Every structure is written in C-alpha cells, then in structure tokens.
Image (cartoon, rainbow, N blue to C red):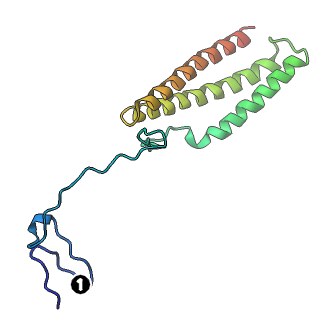
C-alpha cells in the first residue's frame, strides 16, 4: 500500500492525492504562485471575450422574425398601393401602415431593451464595446421617433 501524505483526501490508491493547501504536505517545497499572463492578440493588445451572456431575454425575442415578416408584408402592400397611384388618405395605405408600423414599433422597442442591456453588460468587460452598443441603442431610439412621425403623417392624411 502506498503511504499517503498527511492531509490528503481518502480515495482509491491509484488516483492522485489532493490537498487543500500545499503547505500541509510534508517534504514538498512551497510553490511560488504567479499570476496567469494575459493573453494578447497579434498587435499586443489583451484579447477581449467575443460574447457576454444575456441573463434575461426580452419578451419578443422568440417571435422577432415573425413580427418582422408582418412588417415586411405590410410595407410591401402600402408601398405598392402608393406606387400604383393610390392617395395617402386611402385605407389601402392607412391600414397596412397602422399594422406594419405598430409591429415595427414593438420590434424596435424590444431591440432597444435588448441592446441597452447588452451595453450595460459589456461596460465592465470592455468599455469600448459597451459604448458602441449604447450608440446602437441611441440610433434605435431615433428611428423609433421617426417611425412614430411617419405613422402620424400617413394616418392624419
């Protein structure tokens, strides 16, 4: 039988012995622990993780594509009606704009929430990426306002 060092855990003799601390093993030199070096890319900059996990998904994340398809079809109908000479005051334009615009506002609001959460999650990891995503969120807020304006113009025509 192999003699076990004092402080080693009990286990089968064919496995390695584990200890909680190096200092408890008799006759073993103390290890000089060193920090792990930071991995660098080709240019010598620290490597940044490619993803940060999303802790809480947004409510429309599962139906995002289907809502976008509804927006696409509504836009095609409204644009086709306008191209064929239908006035903007016609129901052939107003109804698709109301349906597609409402869906687009919902999808945009969901994207604003998702990108804002992502930006806040990235700030402690990599500040540049977090600020870049905040710019995305600001652009989406601007597009939300423009969509509301376009819908207002079409629905009041």
Residue depicted at x 49% and y 43%: 42
Estimate the x, y position of residue 36 in percent, counting from the top left: 30, 51
- In the rendered image of this protein, does residue 25 appear above or below residue 33? below
Determine which quarter of the picture holds residue 130. Answer: top left
Estimate the x, y position of residue 135 in percent, counting from the top left: 51, 23
Estimate the x, y position of residue 24 in percent, counting from the top left: 9, 68
Determine which quarter of the picture holds residue 80. Answer: top right
- Quadrant of image for the N terminus: bottom left
- Hey, which residue is sitting farthest front in the picture? 43
- Hey, which residue is sitting farthest top in the picture? 157
In this view, the residue in front, 92 or 37, is 37
Number of marks in picture: 1
Estimate the x, y position of residue 108 in percent, counting from the top left: 59, 27
Residue depicted at x 80% and y 22%: 78
Residue depicted at x 14% and y 81%: 4
- Quadrant of image for the C terminus: top right
Q: Secondary structure at mark 1?
A: loop
- In the rendered image of this protein, does residue 142 appear above or below residue 119? above
In this view, the residue in front, 96 or 55, is 55
Q: Residues within 10 Å of mark 1 (few under 14, many from 20)?
A: few
Residue depicted at x 43% and y 38%: 45
- In the rendered image of this protein, does residue 117 appear above or below residue 31? above
In this view, the residue in front, 136 or 25, is 25
Find disc 1 in the rendering and name its residue.
12
Determine which quarter of the picture holds residue 29. Answer: bottom left
Q: Is residue 136 left or right of residue 31?
A: right
Q: Is residue 71 left or right of residue 133?
A: right
- Hey, which residue is sitting farthest right in the picture? 84
In this view, the residue in front, 32 or 149, is 32
């Amino acid at each position: 039988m192999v003699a076990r060092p004092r402080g080693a855990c009990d286990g089968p003799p064919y496995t390695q012995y584990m200890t909680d601390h190096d200092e408890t093993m008799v006759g073993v030199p103390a290890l000089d622990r060193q920090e792990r070096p930071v991995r660098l890319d080709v240019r010598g900059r620290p490597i940044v993780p490619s993803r940060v996990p999303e802790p809480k998904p947004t409510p429309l994340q599962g139906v995002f594509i289907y809502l976008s398809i509804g927006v696409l079809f509504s836009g095609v109908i409204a644009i086709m009606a306008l191209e064929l000479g239908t006035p903007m005051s016609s129901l052939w334009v107003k109804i698709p704009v109301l349906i597609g615009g409402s869906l687009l506002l919902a999808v945009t609001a969901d994207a604003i929430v998702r990108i804002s959460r992502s930006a806040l999650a990235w700030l402690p990891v990599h500040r540049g990426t977090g600020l870049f995503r905040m710019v995305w969120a600001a652009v989406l807020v601007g597009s939300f306002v423009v969509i509301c304006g376009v819908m207002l113009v079409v629905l009041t025509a």
